[in-house]
Image (cartoon, rainbow, N blue to C red):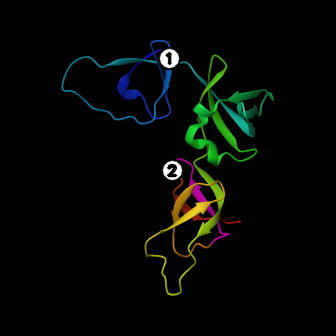
Amino acid sequence: MKVIASSIRKGNIIEQDGKLYVVLTAENIHPGKGTPVQVEKATVEDHNFNYLYEDGDGFHFMNAENYDQVQVSKEIVGSSAPYLQENMTVKLSLHDGNPVAIQLPQRATLEVVETEPVTKGQTASSSYKPAVLSNGVRTAVPPHVATGTRIVVMTEDGSYVERAKD
């Protein structure tokens, strides 16, 4: 289906020369005149799937509605891989029944497995310190966060949101 290019948003999938492309970032520039650029938006279906496991072939998910299982390649999962947790619900975009894109929940709860110790007199307003999470991702946390603390991070970039409330 042809759409005006300026209507394309992050996460949309477009088709060009028979290949599918996932939009990672979208920036609109409005020229003074001329006809709007048209692009072919791929026909995809988004479905919720639960993450099952990873093996040598890729990542395995199950459709919660009909229990169909689907395998997703490491290339499609990409930088989202460390944030996948068993039974996590993700949105898979399917084109002709094949997974072409994945969208994780915005936030994930993980444990801090390594960080500098809390120094007495440090305040929450001072700069963040480096930390390693239970999924191996490096991030920055406030000074009061100690090893063993469960925190909420953004799955897009691993940035600290808050302490977990559990």
Corner quadrant of residue 37: top left
Percent from the top left, x then y, of residue 63?
75, 31
Q: Considering only order in the chain, which callout, 2 or 1, is on the residue closer to the N terminus?
A: 1
Q: Please tell me whether residue 152 belongs to the stretch shown in magenta.
A: yes
Picture disc at residue 19: 1
Which residues, given as a range, are shown in magenta? Answer: 147-156
Residue type (three-letter) at the residue carrying disc 2:
Asp
Residue 58 lies in the magenta-colored region: no
The spot of residue 93 in percent (x, y) is: 61, 28
- Secondary structure found at label 2: loop
Judged from this view, the residue extending furthest toward the right is 67
In the image, farthest residue toward the top: 17
Percent coordinates x, y for residue 107 in the rendering: 59, 52
* Of residues 55 and 67, the one drawn nearer to the viewer in this rendering: 55
The 10 Å Cα crowd at callout 2, few under 14, some 14 to 19, many 20 or more, is few
Image quarter for residue 38?
A: top left
Instruction: Give the CA distance from mark 1 to mark 2.
Output: 27 Å
Q: Is residue 6 left or right of residue 150?
A: left
Instruction: Say which amino acid is labelled 1.
Output: Lys
Give the residue drawn at x 26%, y 16%: 35
> What residue is drawn where x is 64% and y is 35%?
91
Most extreme residue toward the left is 32
Residue at x-position 62% and y-position 34%: 74
Q: List the residue tagged with mark 2.
A: 157
Q: Is residue 76 left or right of residue 52?
A: left
Q: Secondary structure at mark 1?
A: strand
Label 1 packing within 10 angstroms: few (<14), some (14-19), many (20+): few
